[in-house]
Amino acid sequence: MERPSIWVIIVVLLLGVLFLREPRFQRSEEIFLRWLLRHSQPATKPVPLTIVEMGKENPPPPLETALLLQGLLGFKPTVIALEPVLQWGEQVRDQEQIFMDQAMRVPKLLLGAELTASPDPDAPVAEIAGFSQVTGRRGDLPEFSGIEHQPSEDVRVLSTVGFVNFPPDAADDLHVPLLFQYRGEVIPAFALQAIMLWLRVTPDELKIEIGSSIDFPNGLKIPVRSDGTLLVSPRMTQRARRITIDELLLAAQQHESGAATGIRLEDIRTHLVFAHTETNTPDLIAAAIASIQANTFVRRVSWIFDCVMVVAVALLSGWVRRFSRIDLIIGAVAFRLRIV
């Protein structure tokens, strides 16, 4: 038998440290995480979230959006969040008024808007209230200085605005923005703003430590990365109720007439209603909302665990070399059959 070599242990240890420190190697961890989330089912109960699919037209027409609100109001929801930016223009001013008549009846209405880092220098500067209790380094937060797209002023008076930006360097198919930086202030993104309305929490009640967590007064703690994003499992949307606008209108009509319906929406009054179009990135926002409602988050293990594993592999590397290749192959097959 060959004696364990200290050089083998050192080489394995250095390779492990390189893997932990080198960003190109760290991307393999993201690839594995995507595979793991794609093939795993979140272990959680249904969440109080109703997702309404509005079709592909973006923004949806004012009359269609007014019908959506009218159908929902029959079930008395508390919070309705419309992710499309409802910027229609003067040519449909009369139809916009019909939407506004329905919007006035919604207790809490959240509408989408988009920020920009290069605003029109002649445009007036919009004031956005930020969080008052913020600690941590803000350098990695996406930074904006103006609003690029938003609903008309008459519509904004009846609602709260939430920002649906997905900066390419801060968000992908696993990360959803929760925090932005606007002219030196830390402000909420759409998903966080929706949860704040649903839980009836004001910005001054939240304690934010960038790179660590967002703490709610009820004890809810949302993990947040240094870039202001939340790591989510896209499959969390399977725990929400998903309906089309046609199904909603049919259920509302049958509910009003007292007829039996296959879709029971009476519990929607306790739900957060999230409406979206198919052209945007709604599933990620909905996945973030569902994760927060279920208090179920994808968390990375501590760096201490990584260090322990690297040291353990380094120590075992010298011991494993004492066995022949055929013994290692047979042992690996037996271990594989044991865990399958």
Image: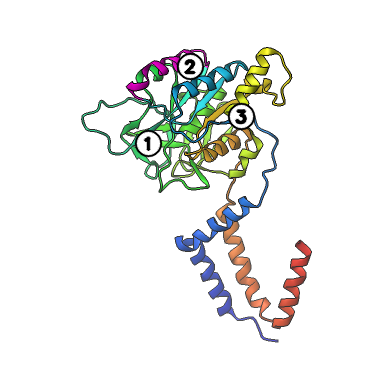
Q: Name the residue that disc number 3 marks.
A: 50
Q: Say whether disc 1 or disc 3 marks the residue closer to the N-terminus.
A: 3
Q: Residues within 10 Å of mark 2 (few under 14, many from 20)?
A: many
User: Mark 1 against mark 2, which lies toward the viewer?
Assistant: 2
Q: Nearer the viewer, residue 291 or 71?
A: 71
Which callout, 3 or 2, points at the residue further toward the start of the chain? 3
Judging by the rendered image, the residue that carries numbered circle 2 is 103
Query: Could you say whether the residue bearing mark 1 is in a helix, strand or loop?
Result: strand
Amino acid type at mark 1: Gln
- What amino acid is labelled 2 in the image? Ala
Magenta stretch, residue numbers: 89-107
Q: Please, which colouring scheme is shown?
A: rainbow
Provide residue 194's location: percent of width, then percent of height: 51, 28
Q: Is residue 31 above or below residue 67?
A: below
Distance of label 1 from label 2 (alpha carbons): 29 Å
Q: Is residue 105 above or below residue 65?
A: above
Q: Position of residue 84 (x, y in %)?
A: 45, 31
